[in-house]
Amino acid sequence: MLKLIVQRLLALVPLLFIVSVLTFSFTSLLPSDPVDLIIGDAGTQEQYEMVRHRLGLDEPVHLRYLQWLGRAVQGDLGTSFFNSVSVTGAVMQRLPVTLSLTVMSAIIAIVIGVAAGVAAALRPRSWIDRFATLGATFGQAVPNFWFGLILVAIFAVNLRWFPATGFTPLTQSPWEWLRSVILPSIALGTSSSAAIARQVRSAMVGVLQQDYIRAARAQGLPFRRVIFRHALTNAMVPVVAVLSFQITVLLGGALIVEQVFAINGLGTLAIGAVRQQDIPMLQGLVLVMVALVVAVQLATDVIYGLINPKARPS
């Protein structure tokens, strides 16, 4: 397992390098100039050239990239064009917010998805199976942002059980943190729970028909032990791949749901950077998101290896 982790970490280096090259190249091809947004229409040509020189935009693209890369390997992702804040500091400040939503959404999706999938598989073609299938179809069809607005209208505006907007850090108040993330996490995790439920049901139905499950039942083993220790453990092998993809989807979906609940996470930072064409901020955000996706894939590989010993590298 240690060999697998080392291999994935070594593969991360060329991946981040390729992503950085592509991101830097694409942002350099933007049709408009960020200097125009900084000085406005009333700026003179002298001011225009001065700002371009201060930002280093008057240098060739390859030199700017090499300078940026030299700072990036030391943990410095540059400085924002518009507010002169450190990109690394801004991203690290917003990262816990987005991770809180993603982790809580993943927990909700896994709990609901696995429970619904197991219940449907134990009683195929029953009303439970049909209800779970209908719920999974509804969950995948409803957009996250629309479902979030419905949750706000019901549980925040009418019932006043949860705050409609904002985020409370976990270190400040664990209870208020939970109240601030529960609605956006439900809105975000519903569609993923539907996809997980479908996969769990399909895998469980196949596993429950295997001979070793029938043999375990014939030996008089407790029903719960057969289901959760034998059947579910083996059914989770193909489900892990779906979990990896869904957690990545949750990470991207959190950037949109943050706008609905007015949460200042990476999504707000990314949208502001796009609107202002803040090139250093965009480059830093892309690299951090890629690193998070790779971390999710690494965790998935480790879990898959623990569940399925045949997948471990020799």
Image: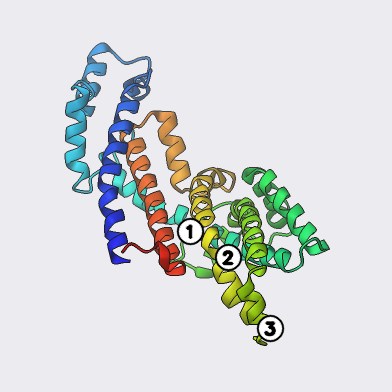
Q: Residue at x 76, y 67 (%)?
A: 123
Q: Residue at x 76, y 63 (%)?
A: 124
Answer left or right for 15 relative to 255: left
- Residue 86 seen from this side: no
x, y percent for residue 266: 44, 46
Q: Nearer the viewer, residue 212 or 96?
A: 212
24 up-or-down from 245: above or below: above
Q: CA distance from mark 2 to mark 3?
A: 20 Å
Mark 2 crowdedness (10 Å alpha carbons): few <14, some 14-19, many ≥20: many
Task: Return the mark for residue 36.
Answer: none
Q: Earlier in the sequence, mark 2 or mark 3?
A: 3
Which quadrant holds the N terminus? bottom left
Q: CA distance from mark 1 to mark 3?
A: 45 Å
Q: CA distance from mark 2 to mark 1?
A: 28 Å
Q: Earlier in the sequence, mark 1 or mark 3?
A: 1
Mark 1 crowdedness (10 Å alpha carbons): few <14, some 14-19, many ≥20: many
Mark 3 crowdedness (10 Å alpha carbons): few <14, some 14-19, many ≥20: few
Q: Earlier in the sequence, mark 2 or mark 1?
A: 1
Disc 2 is placed on an element classified as: helix
Give the residue type at disc 2. Answer: Ala
Marks 2,3: beta carbons within 8 A: no
What residue does disc 1 label?
A: 100
What residue does disc 2 label?
A: 235
Marks 2,1: beta carbons within 8 A: no
Q: Nearer the viewer, residue 39 or 86?
A: 86
What residue does disc 3 label?
A: 218
Give the foreground label among 2 and 3: 3
Answer left or right for 126 relative to 313: right
Marks 1,3: beta carbons within 8 A: no
x, y percent for residue 238: 54, 59
